[in-house]
Amino acid sequence: MHALHESLRTDRSAFELYETACAAGERLAKAMGSLAQHGAESEDALIARLVSQVGGDGGTLADAAVRRAVIAAIGDVRHIHPELGDAIQAGGSSSGFAWDILCDLYQVFFADIVAEFLRSAVAEHVKLAVPVLIVADPESRIADWVAEKLVGLVPNPCEESAEATGLAEALDTAQSTVDSVQNPADALVGIAQSLVPRAVGSVLGLVDEGPSSEQGAAA
């Protein structure tokens, strides 16, 4: 992971990973709003829906990592929230998925992007990115460990919203241009979108967690 971070610090455009992850994060934030209103009738349908909406159709290692990260993130959230199975079965209801589930999905997704990229790098022998992994971890088990370590660095939109005092401040945090929002979920989608640069910068080692992290991610 250190080698990958150093490569990206030297050249943020390396492997097109930063740009691809940011674009996917924006798409995921929008998809969260839809999922909060309408769930999915099965896990396969949820995977197909998010791969289509979030994964894009590019052919780079980064694009492929994003698509696999969608699948991995759904599995991770299913493990964190066993109640997701019930929510999927009730997918036809108007309530959709609970926001705590969606916010956890957001967090694990960005961590899984890095893990899946490392897994791909091992498979494709991208030695410039991860020379140590290829020798020491041919089965890419380290990638799973990396995801577990990185998920805590990703900001949680629900927690960020909870820290805001009132809907007006939540909208400011999300930098919303909407004057009046009747559905608080719209504010959470905006917050999720605004956090994407920080989330990607954190998992890619481009920012330090702390008061200056948002400025570093936006630089």
Image (spheres, rainbow, N blue to C red):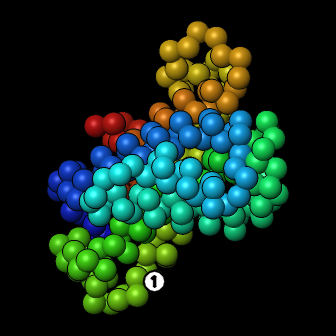
Say which residue appears at 19% left-offset and 77% top-offset: 127
214 sits left or right of 46 in the view: left
135 sits left or right of 51 in the view: left
What's the residue type where badge 1 is placed? Arg
Relative depth, front residue between 71 and 205:
71
User: Which secondary structure, mark 1?
Assistant: helix
* Residue 124 x, y percent position in the rendering: 26, 77
Instruction: Count neighbours of disc 1 (C-alpha within 10 A) and say few if under 14, some if 14 to 19, many if 20 or more.
Output: few
Say which residue appears at 63% left-offset and 54% top-offset: 46
* Residue 181 x, y percent position in the rendering: 66, 16
* Residue 86 x, y percent position in the rendering: 82, 57
Say which residue appears at 54% left-offset and 63% top-offset: 71
Say which residue appears at 79% left-offset and 36% top-offset: 94
Rendered-image quadrant of the N terminus = bottom left
Q: Is residue 207 in sight in this rendering?
A: no
Residue 205 higher or lower than 29, as above or below: below
Relative depth, front residue between 32 and 150:
32
Relative depth, front residue between 100 and 87:
87
